[in-house]
Image (cartoon, helix red, strand yellow):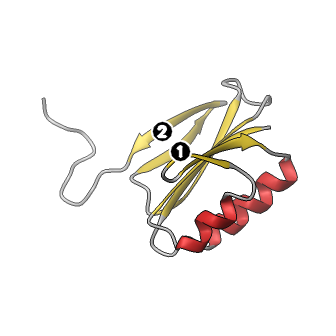
Amino acid sequence: MFAVLTISAVPEHLHGYVSRFLTEVESGVYVGNISRNVRERLWERVSTTLDEGTSTMIYSDPRQEQGFSMLTAGKNSRKVLDLDGLTVVSMRPGRGESKIRDR
């Protein structure tokens, strides 16, 4: 199962842990083929060790129309939504921003 994991502003030891299973192709961006069991355990470890950081995992999922699923953890600025099997990413409005912007 192909997976892409991004982590930012996380404890340094987490980078070392993740690099046991995935290859770091750029700072904080990891890719690789891992089993479902490894993916689930890796995500559990990453999502509970973030402190103030953020993480996103995208992995192949043949059950989804688009062929992938997505997980996020931490203080992300985006929210992942499932709309009848279609994965979309929504921007969360920040402080002082309205949900509908004037043009």
The residue labelled by disc 1 is 80
The label on residue 89 is 2
Q: Residue at x 28, y 45 (%)?
A: 99
Picture quadrant where residue 32 is located: top right
- Depth check, front residue: 7 or 47: 7
Q: Is 63 left, or right, of 83 in this rendering? A: right
Seen as rendered, the residue at the extreme top is 65
Which residue is pictured at 68% across the width and 66% down the height? 17
Q: Position of residue 10 (x, y in %)?
A: 50, 68
Q: Considering depth in this image, is 60 or 31 the residue closer to the camera?
A: 31
Type of residue at label 1? Val
The foreground one among 6 and 20 is 20
Mark 2 or mark 1: name the one nearer the start of the chain: 1
As drawn, 14 above or below 102: below
SS category of the residue bearing label 2: strand
Left or right of 5, for residue 10: left
Q: Which mark is residue 43?
A: none
Which residue is painted at 68% across and 33% down in the image?
68
Quadrant (top left, top right, bottom left, bottom right) of the N terminus: top right
User: Which amino acid type is marked by label 2?
Assistant: Val
Whether label 2 touches label 1, CB < 8 Å: yes
CA gap, disc 2 and disc 1? 5 Å
The quadrant in which residue 76 appears is bottom left
Around disc 1, counting alpha carbons within 10 Å, would you say few (fewer than 14), some (14 to 19), or many (20 or more)?
some
Residue 55, position as x, y percentages in the image:
54, 57
